[in-house]
């Protein structure tokens, strides 16, 4: 199955929020849309473009059966990944960004992966029921505070 990348360029500031109540005295949250919301928006757009019969989708036992009833069975086999922020300075090859792994640190500007300690740390015990857990530890100099929050796939 071919892989297709979609680049969405906003005309204005994008604001996505979760399903929590939003009003006076309540804090709002924003960020990238949740993957399931993004997938739902793309599926709806694809259904509309394919001329699907939305009424025939109601009451079907599964999503795949709903797509078949609507006349777009291929949509059940379509997978979605993302959304990701991306550098699109070269539109021919956009570079998506992903969150940096939690075990990444920088030492003298070079990325270093934090490794679990093999010997017990004095005074530390793993949470109950998790005997295999060990703290992550950097055995070199102190990590830089300028740890990147985002990485390209190449950087990852």
Image (cartoon, helix red, strand yellow):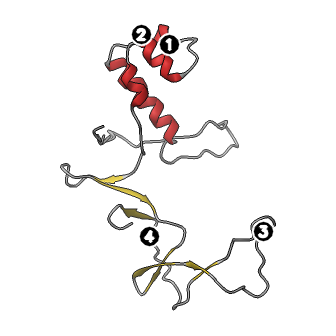
Q: With 46 as the anchor, is 56 left or right in this view?
A: right
Query: Nearer the viewer's eye, disc 4 or disc 3?
Result: 3
Q: Label 2 belongs to which residue?
A: 53
Q: Residues within 10 Å of mark 1 (few under 14, many from 20)?
A: some
Q: Identify the disc placed on residue 57.
A: 1
Query: Upstream in the sequence, badge 4 or badge 1?
Result: 1
Q: Where is residue 26 in the image (x, y as percent from the top left)?
A: 68, 43
First reached walking from the N terminus: tag 3 or tag 1: 1
Residue extending farthest to the bottom is 141
Tags 4 and 2 in contact by the CB under 8 Å rule?
no
Q: In this view, does 104 lie above or below 6?
A: below
Image quadrant occupied by the C terminus = bottom left
* Circle 4 or circle 1, nearest the eye: 1
Q: Nearer the viewer, mark 4 or mark 2?
A: 2
For residue 80, side relative to residue 119 (left or right): left
Binning the other alpha carbons within 10 Å of mark 3 as few (below 14), some (14 to 19) or many (20 upward) gives: few
Q: Is 28 left or right of 53, judged from the image as shown?
A: right
Q: Residue at x 27, y 39 (%)?
A: 2
Spatial CA distance of label 4 from label 1 is: 45 Å
The numbered dot on residue 148 is: 4
| Inter-mark Cα distance, 2 to 3 | 52 Å
Q: Quadrant of the N terminus?
A: top left
Secondary structure under the numbered disc 4 in the rendered image: loop
- Residue located beneath label 3 in the image: 127
From the viewer's side, name the closer residue of 32 and 140.
140
Q: How would you rate the neighbour count of disc 2 (Cα within 10 Å): few for under 14, some for 14-19, many for 20 or more? A: some
């Amino acid at each position: 199955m071919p892989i297709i990348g979609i680049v969405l360029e906003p005309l204005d500031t994008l604001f996505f929020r979760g399903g929590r109540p939003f009003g006076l005295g309540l804090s709002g949250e924003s960020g990238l849309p949740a993957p399931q919301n993004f997938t739902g928006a793309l599926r709806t757009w694809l259904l509309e473009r394919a001329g699907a019969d939305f009424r025939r989708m109601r009451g079907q036992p599964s999503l795949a059966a709903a797509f078949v009833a609507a006349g777009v069975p291929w949509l059940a086999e379509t997978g979605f990944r993302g959304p990701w922020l991306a550098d699109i300075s070269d539109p021919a090859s956009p570079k998506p960004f992903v969150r940096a792994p939690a075990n990444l640190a920088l030492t003298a500007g070079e990325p270093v992966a934090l490794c679990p300690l093999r010997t017990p740390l004095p005074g530390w015990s793993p949470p109950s029921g998790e005997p295999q857990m060990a703290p992550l530890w950097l055995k070199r100099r102190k990590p830089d505070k300028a740890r990147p929050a985002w990485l390209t796939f190449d950087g990852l």
